[in-house]
């Protein structure tokens, strides 16, 4: 197929948009209307918590307004467990440092700062694009006082969770598992979301299933679940009036949003299967190009294929320069770069996206410590400034991009997108 014969799509091809199912989600919303449960309580909220527990295999789930709210309450639970309750006006992590995945969305990191903590970013490894266990182990040598780790499963691919859990156990650290992008992914036949001391999932509009918003906190005890539910409803005490003895939040999931999530759960396996088909079709279509798809550990994990991503081989990269908000590239025959590919897709009304910009490169967190490996495989702090480091996350950001992975995209539409990407290397 010649690209000169390709016209822009009349209807935009999205990165990942919500997929509704006729009558199903709307039926649960209608039920909430008929019962007049237009609030943060009701059958739909209760059912979402039950579905989360049963599908994931976790002891308790708390339905919340978004994944970030779930992360915040996970941080509070972990902080209280480690350091006790905070003084009024202070966060539970005030003056404490926390190890965190570097390549992620900032929602993973911000709740640490809500509670007064300082994130220390751990570099990425190449096999899964997740936190590097080697760098994490060395980070504990550099910062032995750290007792909390926040781990992300990027783009639906499970991290090397066994190694990371062993390291946390060795150093007496708690683990928060951000499974916002990996609902339905398996690691050694267990769902992501069960491995952390505290874990979260997200139902944001572009996730594997959605409520337009929403998330859930996953915990192992009823005590933690009850404490989170109390915090999420402004920490009201059991009294005839509004009695408050600690800081609370307006974080509970609405019964309307829960109706959508409840209906979506009926189709989660179907969504994952479609995402896998999209990934495999890209992989086959690009086999002659100097690119690789985002990878996973075949014998240990089964991703949910939330987003299909590619990374351009180093020798096939044309010159590309990125500022804080703009990027430039110089076209070169036989070579390309993420900027060129994304701009070309956009010309055809197709949405792609750069890989998450690493947190240590973000202006707001640029002065935070960052632990990566030098040429000898040993960890160094802020080595990206000092030179002589690997900085895997920055390299993936420079050479990688997210491809349109919308499950409503047809095979014919995806075939055209594959040809558009190929044309960038001509």
Image (tube, rainbow, N blue to C red):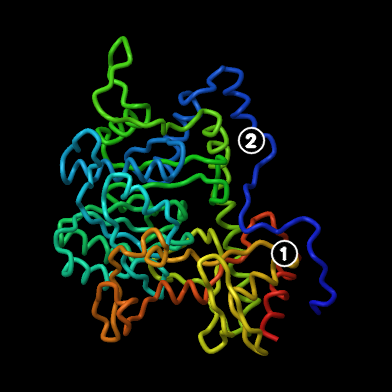
**Dividing the picture into quarters, in which one does residue 79 lie?**
top left
The quadrant where residue 74 appears = top left
Q: Is residue 351 above or below residue 17?
A: below
What residue is at 26 percent from the left and 86 percent from the top?
A: 376
In the rendered image, the vertical position of residue 231 relative to residue 157, given as above or below: above
On the image, the x and y values in percent for residue 100 come to 31, 59
Q: Are marks 1 and 2 in contact (CB under 8 Å)?
A: no
Name which quarter of the figure residue 312 lies in: bottom right
Pick the residue in front: 424 or 318.
318
Decide: is 163 above or below 408: below
Left or right of residue 320, residue 220 in this image: left
Query: What mark, if any, has residue 24 been given in the picture?
Result: 2
Task: Identify the residue shown where x is 70% and y is 86%.
Answer: 426
Residue placed at 72% from the left, 80% from the top? Answer: 423
Q: Position of residue 414 (x, y in %)?
A: 70, 66
Secondary structure of the residue carrying numbered label 2: helix
* Label ID, residue 411: 1
**How crowded is the residue under tag 2: few (<14 C-alpha within 10 Å), some, or many (20+)?**
some
User: How many tags in the picture?
Assistant: 2
**Depth check, front residue: 393 or 54:** 393
In this rendering, is residue 317 above or below 243? Answer: below
From the viewer's perspective, tell me whether residue 267 is left or right of residue 13.
left
Residue found at x 14% / y 63%: 144
- At numbered mark 1, what does the secondary structure look like: helix, strand or loop? helix
Quarter of the rendering occupied by the N terminus: bottom right
Residue 395 location (% of width, % of height): 45, 77
- Work out whether mark 1 precedes mark 2 in sequence or the reverse, and give the earlier one: 2
CA gap between label 1 and label 2 equals 25 Å
Mark number, residue 311: none
The outermost residue toward the top is: 240
Q: Residues within 10 Å of mark 1 (few under 14, many from 20)?
A: few
Q: Position of residue 265 (x, y in %)?
A: 53, 42
């Amino acid at each position: 197929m010649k690209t000169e014969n390709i016209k822009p799509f009349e209807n935009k091809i999205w990165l990942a948009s919500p997929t509704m199912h006729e009558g199903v989600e709307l039926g649960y919303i209608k039920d909430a209307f008929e019962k007049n449960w237009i609030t943060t309580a009701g059958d739909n909220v209760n059912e979402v918590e039950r579905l989360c527990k049963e599908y994931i295999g976790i002891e308790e789930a708390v339905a919340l307004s978004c994944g970030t709210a779930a992360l915040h309450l996970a941080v509070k639970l972990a902080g209280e467990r480690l350091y006790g309750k905070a003084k009024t006006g202070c966060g539970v992590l005030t003056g404490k440092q926390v190890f965190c995945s570097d390549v992620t969305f900032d929602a993973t990191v911000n709740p640490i700062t809500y509670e007064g903590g300082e994130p220390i970013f751990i570099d990425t490894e190449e096999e899964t694009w997740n936190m590097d266990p080697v760098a994490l182990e060395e980070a504990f040598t550099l910062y032995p006082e750290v007792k909390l780790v926040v781990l992300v499963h990027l783009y639906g691919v499970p991290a090397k969770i066994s190694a990371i859990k062993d390291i946390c156990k060795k150093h007496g650290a708690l683990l928060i598992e951000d499974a916002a992008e990996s609902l339905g992914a398996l690691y050694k036949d267990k769902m992501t979301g069960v491995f952390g001391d505290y874990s979260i999932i997200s139902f944001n509009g572009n996730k594997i299933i959605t409520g337009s918003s929403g998330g859930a906190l996953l915990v192992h005890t009823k005590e933690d679940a009850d404490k989170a539910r109390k915090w999420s409803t402004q920490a009201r005490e059991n009294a005839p009036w509004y009695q408050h003895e600690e800081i609370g939040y307006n974080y509970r999931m609405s019964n309307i949003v829960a109706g959508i999530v409840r209906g979506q759960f009926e189709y989660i396996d179907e969504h994952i299967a479609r995402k896998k088909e999209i990934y495999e079709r890209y992989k086959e279509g690009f086999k002659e190009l100097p690119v690789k798809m985002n990878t996973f550990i075949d014998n240990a994990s089964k991703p949910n294929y939330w987003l299909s991503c590619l990374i351009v081989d180093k020798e096939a990269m044309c010159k590309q320069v990125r500022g804080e908000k703009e990027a430039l590239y110089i076209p070169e025959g036989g070579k390309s770069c993420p900027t060129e590919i994304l701009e070309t897709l956009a010309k055809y009304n197709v949405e792609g996206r750069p890989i998450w910009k690493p947190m240590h490169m973000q202006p707001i967190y640029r002065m935070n410590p960052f632990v990566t490996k030098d040429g000898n495989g040993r960890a160094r702090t802020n080595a990206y400034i000092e030179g002589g480091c690997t900085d895997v996350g920055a390299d993936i950001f420079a050479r990688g991009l997210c491809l349109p992975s919308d499950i409503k995209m047809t095979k014919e539409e995806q075939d055209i997108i594959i040809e558009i990407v190929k044309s960038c290397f001509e």
